Image (tube, helix red, strand yellow):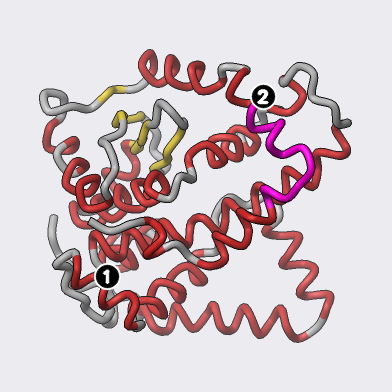
């Protein structure tokens, strides 16, 4: 078992500290919880999705508990949602749930599904779930802040809160990627990004991972060429919940080469394997 502090990305910590420093943020969080949004989500999950268990699609459910044990967390509620878009997400705070879509299960093989679940469990281990729930509802068009009775700030004053929350959300994904790499392996974690970015294995199995990661360096060079390009890319990412895929892959590969990663992987008994051209994991 490892601790979240062992793998949390420094940009995640920095962004979270900046978020907490925003005046009134604590009031927003308290109001969010008191309003009962979590119970609303909990009820909707039970009514509209299939809750997985040892007796309900156990071949899917049984992938989750071993991951939770490695990360030292309780097994969350686990749901299957009919949605052709491949996705997995975590909601809640005191009642935490992980949802996988039918599209995710159809797009990924077993090892890649494990990686996606390890990513979500990384969020739980890092205690991301409350703030991520807020961010997801904001992105879904729910104006949480206007629903909280007695919130003293005007809507315009909440704009920095929204963008600070989303900025942190993107950085939190880097920590969850690290958890996935530790628990399910670097290759499976990178392969998951390949599938979600480029399509099914039949198309993407021969992707050159190093060349793809190089695109992140090219992207950084683009942003540094002039202020206008930098401003355009900042604008492009403002409402995004996740970092761009090439950046995520570069971060995973870079961290996997550090002594820090090697020691943590060894403590989990996880073999550290360098990613080669394409994914070598053919587990179905």
Residue 251 in magenta? no
Horizontally, residue 37 falls left or right of residue 272, namely right
The circle drawn on residue 31 is 2
Q: Secondary structure at mark 2?
A: helix
Which one is in front, 217 or 3?
Answer: 3
Would you place residue 73 above or below residue 258 in this image? above
Q: Position of residue 36 (x, y in %)?
A: 56, 17
Would you place residue 193 above or below residue 273 in this image? above
- Identify the residue at horizontal 86%, vertical 31% (top origin): 153
- Identify the residue at horizontal 71%, vertical 39% (top origin): 25
The circle drawn on residue 78 is none
Q: Give the Cα separation between the discs numbered 2 and 1.
A: 38 Å
- Identify the residue at horizontal 49%, vertical 45% (top origin): 128
Q: Position of residue 169 (x, y in %)?
A: 57, 51
Q: Count of labels shown? A: 2
Quarter where residue 65 is shown: top left
Horizontally, residue 175 falls left or right of residue 217, namely left
Which one is in front, 52 or 147?
Answer: 147
Q: Which residue is mark 1?
A: 264
Q: Secondary structure at mark 1?
A: helix
The magenta segment is 19-31
Would you place residue 81 above or below residue 226 in this image? above
Is the residue marked by circle 2 packed among few (<14), some (14-19), or many (20+) residues within 10 Å? Answer: some
Q: Which quadrant, please, contains the C terminus?
A: bottom left
Is the residue marked by circle 1 packed among few (<14), some (14-19), or many (20+) residues within 10 Å? Answer: some
Which one is in front, 226 or 117?
Answer: 117
Q: Position of residue 57 (x, y in %)?
A: 15, 29
């Amino acid at each position: 078992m490892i601790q979240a502090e062992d793998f949390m990305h420094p940009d995640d910590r920095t962004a979270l500290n900046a978020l907490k420093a925003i005046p009134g943020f604590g009031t927003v969080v308290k109001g969010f919880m008191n309003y009962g949004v979590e119970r609303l989500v909990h009820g909707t999950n039970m009514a509209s999705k299939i809750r997985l268990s040892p007796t309900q699609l156990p071949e899917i459910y049984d992938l989750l508990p071993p991951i939770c044990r490695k990360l030292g967390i309780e097994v969350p509620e686990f749901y299957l949602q009919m949605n052709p878009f491949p996705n997995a997400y975590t909601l809640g705070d005191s009642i935490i749930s992980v949802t996988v879509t039918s599209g995710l299960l159809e797009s990924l093989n077993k090892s890649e599904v494990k990686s996606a679940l390890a990513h979500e469990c990384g969020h739980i281990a890092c205690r991301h779930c409350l703030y991520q729930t807020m961010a997801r509802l904001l992105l879904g068009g729910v104006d949480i802040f206007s629903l909280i009775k007695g919130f003293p700030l005007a809507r315009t004053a909440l704009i920095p809160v929204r963008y600070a929350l989303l900025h942190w959300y993107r950085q939190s994904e880097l920590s969850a990627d690290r958890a996935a790499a530790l628990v399910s392996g670097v290759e499976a974690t990178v392969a998951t990004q390949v599938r979600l970015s480029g399509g099914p294995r039949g198309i993407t199995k021969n992707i050159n991972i190093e060349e793809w990661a190089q695109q992140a360096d090219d992207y950084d060079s683009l942003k540094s060429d002039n202020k206008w390009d930098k401003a355009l890319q900042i604008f492009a990412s403002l409402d995004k919940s996740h970092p761009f895929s090439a950046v995520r892959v570069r971060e995973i590969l870079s961290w996997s080469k550090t002594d820090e990663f090697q020691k943590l992987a060894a403590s989990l008994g996880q073999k550290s394997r360098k990613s080669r051209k394409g994914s070598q994991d053919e587990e179905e």
